[in-house]
Structures are given as C-alpha cells and as structure tokens.
Image: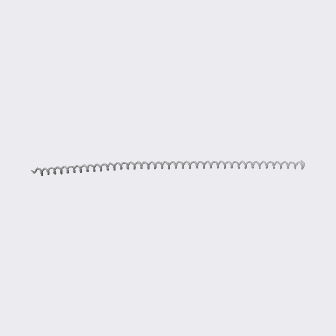
C-alpha cells in the first residue's frame, strides 16, 4: 500500500469520525430539545393545573359568599317578621287596652247616670213630700182639727 493510499484511508476515517461526531452532537441536541420541550409542556401543564386550582378556589369563595349573603338575607327577613309580629301584638294589646278603657268609661258613665237618676228620684220624692206636707198644712190651716 502506497503512502498516498494510506493518506486517503486516514482522511476517509477522519471524515467518518467527524460525521459520527456530528451525528452524535445532533442526537444530543435533539435530545436536549426534546427534554426542553418536555419541560416546557410540564411547566404549561403545571400552570394550567395551578390556574384550574385558582379557578376552583375562586368558585368556592364565591359560593361561600353567596351562602353568607343568603343567610344574612334570611336573618334579616326573620328579624323583620319578628318585628312585624311584635308590632301586631302591640297593636292588638293597644286595641284591647283601648276596648278596656272604653268599657271602663261606659261603666263609669252608666254609674253616673244611675246616680243622677237616683238623685232625681230622691229630689222628686222630697218635692212630693213637701207638696203633700204643704197641702196638708194648708188644709190644717183651713180645717183645723
């Protein structure tokens, strides 16, 4: 084998080695790119999951707020109903008291009327007795016994 052929063989071997190295480098690069893509995808998934969790938390908070508002409204309604009932009871009591006062006033008026009637009767009796005694006195004067 001549030295020229040897050189050519060496050159071919070197070229092959370089090609292999290049291929290895390309494979490594592709692997790295693949890993980077995977990492990016994972990060995106994590972000989405995090956002989903945030959304869920927000929804839960909103639901809790709505429930609290409903409870407050119910309490207010109950208070209003309680106040209305109290007012109605007070009105009924006032009415009953008013009726009692009216009854008492009527009774008092009736008693006063009865007293007045009694007084009038007594006066009439006195007058009648006076007129009788006067007339009898006159008779006595006219016809002495």
Q: How is the image coloured?
A: one colour
Q: Going by the image, does 110 lie left or right of 90?
A: left
Q: Going by the image, does 31 lie left or right of 77?
A: right
Q: How many marks?
A: 0
> Residue 48's x, y, as percent?
64, 48
Nearer the observer, 128 or 137? 137
> Residue 88's x, y, as percent?
41, 48
Question: Seen from this angle, which residue lies furthest front?
Answer: 142
> Residue 84's x, y, as percent?
43, 48
Q: Going by the image, does 133 lie left or right of 100?
A: left
Nearer the observer, 102 or 67? 102
Nearer the observer, 56 or 37? 56
> Residue 16's x, y, as percent?
82, 48
Question: Seen from this angle, which residue lies furthest left?
Answer: 145
């Amino acid at each position: 084998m001549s030295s020229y052929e040897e050189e050519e063989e060496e050159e071919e071997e070197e070229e092959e080695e370089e090609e292999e190295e290049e291929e290895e480098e390309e494979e490594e690069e592709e692997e790295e790119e693949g890993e980077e893509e995977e990492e990016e995808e994972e990060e995106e998934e994590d972000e989405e999951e995090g956002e989903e969790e945030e959304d869920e938390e927000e929804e839960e908070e909103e639901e809790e707020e709505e429930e609290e508002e409903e409870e407050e409204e119910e309490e207010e309604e109950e208070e209003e109903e309680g106040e209305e009932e109290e007012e109605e009871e007070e009105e009924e009591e006032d009415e009953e008291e008013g009726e009692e006062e009216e009854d008492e006033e009527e009774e008092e008026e009736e008693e006063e009327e009865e007293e007045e009637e009694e007084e009038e009767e007594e006066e009439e009796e006195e007058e009648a007795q006076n007129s009788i005694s006067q007339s009898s006195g006159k008779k006595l004067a006219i016809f002495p016994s």
